[in-house]
Image (cartoon, rainbow, N blue to C red):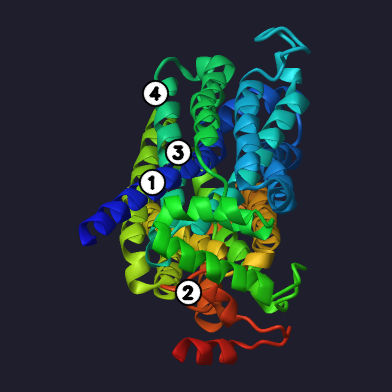
Amino acid sequence: MAIQQAIQSRQSSNYITLLTLVAALGGMLFGWDTAVISGTVSSLDAFFISPLGLVEYEANSLLGTLVSSALIGCIIGGAIAGKLSQKFGRKKILIVSAALFFISALGSAFPEIGFYNIGGENANQSLPQFIFYRILGGVGVGMASMLSPMYIAEIAPANIRGRLVSYNQMAIVTGIIIVYFVNYLIALQGDDSWIQTVGWRYMFASEMIPAAIFFGLLFTVPESPRWHALQGHDDLAKETLTKLHGSEEAAAEFKQIKQSINHHGSSKLFSYGMFVVVIGVLLSVFQQVIGINAVLYYAPEIFKDMGSGTSAAMLQTIIIGAVNVIFTLVAIFTVDRYGRKPLMIFGALGMSVAMISLGFSFYNESMGITVLIAMLAYVAFFSLSWGPVCWVLLSEIFPNKIRSMALSLAVAAQWVTNYLVSWSFPLMNNDSYLIEQFNHGFAYWIYGGMSLLAAFFVWKFVPETKGKSLEEMENLWQNDTQVSAVNLTKQEAS
């Protein structure tokens, strides 16, 4: 009997891991789609913006808008994914996101399709079409960024949930480093002129392959058992839970899920009070205002600021991607051991030191290895903390009844902040006055200060969630909008 249980447990564990890997492909496409722009910034500037003959501020503003245009879609996707997944299920909306990834990749590579001859003399007038396809892909990113970690959290056992949800962040950074490498290989195929006219198209088109794979594999995974339970599909919920955890554990978990659902009748967003929702939104906001996507989106341009050529800048960007992957692995193996709060606080403090140092490196014109070390240290601290662990917290802190709606709001807030950071970075980094006064260092000091605030926020207000089931998480929150951090600390201690 014990042997049979051990075999069943191993089979269930393998099955959960496979489902996690499929869902995490949404994270990989999230990383791919958001980072592919990094290798194309100067090309898009030369192809779309330079011919317009704009003054400096207008050109910088339009470049920021073009680079961050996908984030408009991310805001939309994050905002609507909650209601859509609540009505139609997590799986179906993930399938929609995969389709949007594919369409966006094709349209971004050839935005003039149906309007101008591909590569013709008027092709650079297809900027509105390009922005449309980037926004469309952003909708897919916004959906996947919310649904992939939520789906994983809803199928994962409590004792390894942190690790499994972190696989999604591992997939994100894997997508980032793959597309960095793809961009670099494409850049080697020609000179700057070729990259600016043709090469950037291949960079965007490369996303079509993983998008097609993700779309096909999603038809092989089951729907979330917690969504089935919320919809009253009890038999389907039990069936999926049995496949995931075995019959004995499935019965106990199903009972706990139904008790959670029946105990709290309302599914309104603030039915557990405002505090839990505000915590989730602020976690999302802080993950962005610390500046990570300014580094990831504009990494080649940052290296060009310190004197690197196009190919060298892209190679250095690959090194950043490798550090991102390595330290995300550290988070995967430590998040369930040390907890969420210690990693988040440690990482935020480390990022603050790295960003302030990076700012001084530019200010003092201490280029070369100093800048590279500061950037690598910043990415390392982010990757072992706010990268994966923030998504772990967001996927677990919200109660069952409001999870999809609250997480949708938090993700939408994250993408709004991401857009503002990505749009504002070239305004700060390329502004003549700020360059004259701070030599490209100003923006990094802002991000360093925000990292300090992020550490304080987690220390003071965010509860520890390690080892708690999703249903137990509800005990952390009261039906009172005046819940204080003191009360949460007392609950943790008890």
Question: What residue do we see at 60% from left, 73% from top?
Answer: 259
In this rendered view, identify the residue nearer to me: 465 or 236. 236
Provide the residue designation for mark 1: 15
Q: In terms of sequence position, does the residue under pointer 3 or pointer 1 come before the other?
A: 1
Provide the residue designation for mark 2: 465
SS category of the residue bearing label 4 = helix
- Left or right of 96, for residue 354: left
Q: Are marks 4 and 3 in contact (CB under 8 Å)?
A: no
x%, y% of residue 375?
40, 53
Provide the residue designation for mark 3: 175
Closer to the eye: label 2 or 3: 2
x%, y% of residue 487?
58, 91
Provide the residue designation for mark 4: 185
Closer to the eye: label 1 or 2: 1
Cα–Cα span, label 1 and label 4: 36 Å
Q: Are marks 1 and 4 in contact (CB under 8 Å)?
A: no
As displayed, is residue 334 above or below residue 366? below
In this rendered view, identify the residue nearer to me: 17 or 127. 17
| Quadrant of residue 164 within the rendered picture | bottom left
Going by the numbered disc 4, the residue's amino acid type is Leu
